[in-house]
Image: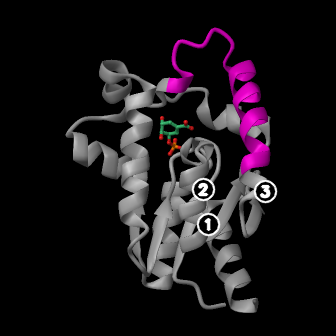
Amino acid sequence: MFIQNLSLIGFMGSGKSTIGKMLADKLNFLFLDTDKLIEYIQGTTISEIFKQHGENFFREIESKVIKKIYNNKNCVFACGGGVFCTAENIEIIRENSFVVYLHMSEPEAYERLKDVKDRPLLLKEADLKQKIAQMMNVRKDIYKNNCDLEIDINRKSPDLIAQDIIDYLKMH
Ligand code: S3P
């Protein structure tokens, strides 16, 4: 399959950045990570942006970044987990890329996220398991209904997942 761009979407901790870099190498595409671009533009970390300006401000910058970067071709984009919560973002991303949803179960998400400190939306949660379940519940259909390919990543290594995606593109 000929693709202009590839986007990785999915919940926090699904490995979008790690797998995205691998895919960019394999496809000889440029790798761009929305969170890293936002940190670069703002000159500080995502956690600090949330702390100082709040989520709405972060979402505004995120949408501006989406508008700009999808003018490019031959890129792999790792999209922050909340990028798909805005209809306009979804439209831009779907129009300009092949969208791969990295799907994982709630227990897998919990295992991957239980010790992280750099996801402001999950910090200070008395019941992290419940918070993850609640967020995944809201988001899972949005991810599912707006992707071109869904990959189950439970207990799979990033290498294997990247190869599965490449194999799919070769076969279609
Ligand atoms: C968010 C996911 C994060 C980051 C921010 C908000 C979300 O990115 O954009 O903390 O709303 O799911 P990752 O999905 O790369 O962790």
Image colouring = one colour
Image quadrant assignment for residue 145 = bottom right
Task: Determine the secondary structure under disc 3.
Answer: helix
Residue that label 2 marks: 90
> Could you say which is closer to the camera, residue 157 or residue 18?
18
How packed mark 2 is, by other alpha carbons closer than 10 Å (few <14, some 14-19, many 20 or more), is some
> Could you say which is closer to the camera, residue 18 or residue 139?
139
Distance, label 1 to label 3, CA atoms, is: 11 Å
Task: Determine the secondary structure under disc 2.
Answer: helix
Image quadrant assignment for residue 100 = bottom right
Q: Is residue 163 above or below residue 112?
A: below
Disc 2 marks which amino acid? Answer: Ile
* Residue depicted at x 38% and y 75%: 72
Which of the image's four quarters has the C terminus? bottom right
Image quadrant assignment for residue 43 = top left
Magenta stretch: residue 132 in it? yes
Which label number is shown at residue 94? 1
Is residue 97 at least partly visible in the picture? no
Q: Which residues are magenta?
A: 121-142
Q: Are marks 1 and 3 in contact (CB under 8 Å)?
A: no
Label the magenta part by its dominant secondary structure: helix
Residue that label 3 marks: 145
Q: Position of residue 45 (x, y in %)?
A: 30, 35
Disc 1 marks which amino acid? Answer: Arg
Distance, label 1 to label 2, CA atoms, is: 6 Å
Q: Are marks 1 and 2 in contact (CB under 8 Å)?
A: yes
Taking 130 as reference, is 17 left or right? left
Taking 58 as reference, is 132 left or right? right
